Amino acid sequence: RKRIVSGVQPTGSIHLGNYLGAIKNWIALQNTYETLFFIVDLHAITLPYDTQQLSKATRDTAAIYLACGVDTSKGDENVGVALLTYPVLMASDILLYQFIGLWKKGFQLIHGLYGYLLDDNLDSFDIVLLQSDFVPVGEDQKQHLELTRELAERVNYLYGGRKWKKLGGRGGAIFKVPEPLISPAGARVMSLTDGLSKMSKSAPSDQSRINILDPKDVIANKIKRCKTDSYPGLEFDNPERPECNNLLSIYQLMSGKTKEEVAEECHNMNWGTFKSVLTDALIEHLHPIQLLMCVKLVRMSTSGACNVDFFSSLCVCSCPFLPDVRHAEIISDSTYLDKVLAEGASKAGDIADATLNNVYQAMGFLRT
Ligand code: TYM
């Protein structure tokens, strides 16, 4: 099976851009691929930060992954949520999971691949390559992926020995050179207050973004106040109307309609009408995620006392038992989330160890 890796920084609030550019696509891909989705906490300390805030944001992000549908229960093959614990950036996050496994009679041998290769006795092994093939991200990460690819190619060129060619004919490959997977819709969600800048966690005004955990009234207010224009009707792809294109695109993704359907539905609308349609679509899409997040956490912290299916069914209407999400308290002491993170980190750690081992050997380091 092919593998995908991706992650989100635990800084600020996770917003619609993160969701549409990345997380939503992960969910669509996770049944087809083996997945590693991380919370890249070490990326979050490159600017001054508050240590308590970092732990809280890490748990928040884990909870959002789970509520959005990241599946952590797919057996050994799937590392749902991993917490990275080493001080290197994106290329290493991706390349560390370039595990090459050797299988013999059903057993996975994860140590010292080079040792086996030096035996020149590959015939007795079933060889399975498990490397990151794709990295599903938004448009803004494309250049980082380029650097990752260059580094992988360079290591292959410098250290990929002849013997590696025996592995599935990938001559000289220590690392598979991963491809970005950028879904055209949602690749670049723009700010609500300026259709020419990207929606971002670090923009000072919270009005510029829809956060995944924004309550209904906040969403309604942000859409009410978001920037529009004074052209008649609504249309996609007019460079003079970046806000219009952005809001229609958001509506398209939230409603699950096609671009053509949205263009047809909205071309005669005025802003007032459209804003209310968009607000409803956002709430309808995000509210179940928010509720599910609460429910999962409540369920865990009350040892299964709540029934997820029961609460999920309430998500389509307005849930009478849970007020609009005030999740912080529930998350902050959740042992459940910490357990999910620790399990993910341990599985990811095994793969990372194997990769490092291979690379060290390829580079001639002695490992004791
Ligand atoms: P981060 O945390 O800034 O963003 C997480 C994901 O959200 C996407 N994204 C957007 N997509 C569309 N429109 C937007 N306005 C928007 N804003 C953010 C990003 O493209 C990203 O996919 N360096 C990365 C995290 C990272 C990573 C990795 C990703 C670290 N290691 C390894 C993949 C693989 C970052 O800062 O993303």
Image (cartoon, grey):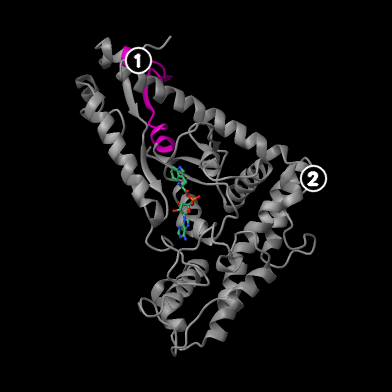
Read off the magenta span: 92-115
Is residue 47 found inside the magenta-colored segment of the image?
A: no
* Residue type at numbered disc 1: Phe
> Quarter-wise, where is residue 39 in the image?
top right
Q: Please indicate whether residue 316 sits to the left or right of residue 226 in the image.
A: right
> Quarter-wise, where is residue 90 in the image?
top left
Question: Which residue is under mark 2?
Answer: 305
Look at the numbered disc 2 and give the secondary structure of its residue. Answer: loop
User: Residue 300: x, y in percent?
Assistant: 73, 42
User: Residue 219: x, y in percent?
Assistant: 63, 70
Looking at the picture, does residue 339 appear above or below residue 17?
Answer: above
Mark 2 CB within 8 Å of ligand 1: no
How far apart in space, not on screen, are marks 1 and 2 (Cα)? 53 Å
> Residue 178: in sight, yes or no?
no
Asked if the residue under mark 2 is in contact with the one under mark 1, i.e. CB atoms within 8 Å, the reply is no
319 or 99, nearer to the observer: 99
User: Could you tell me which residue is drawn at 37 percent across and 46 percent down?
Assistant: 144
* Residue type at numbered disc 2: Ala
Q: Nearer the viewer, mark 1 or mark 2?
A: 1
User: Residue 21: x, y in percent?
Assistant: 45, 57
Is residue 109 found inside the magenta-colored segment of the image?
A: yes
Residue 365's mark? 1
Look at the numbered disc 1 and give the secondary structure of its residue. Answer: loop
Q: How many numbered discs sit on the rendered protein? A: 2
The N terminus: image quadrant? top left
Q: Residues within 10 Å of mark 2 (few under 14, many from 20)?
A: few
The C terminus: image quadrant? top left
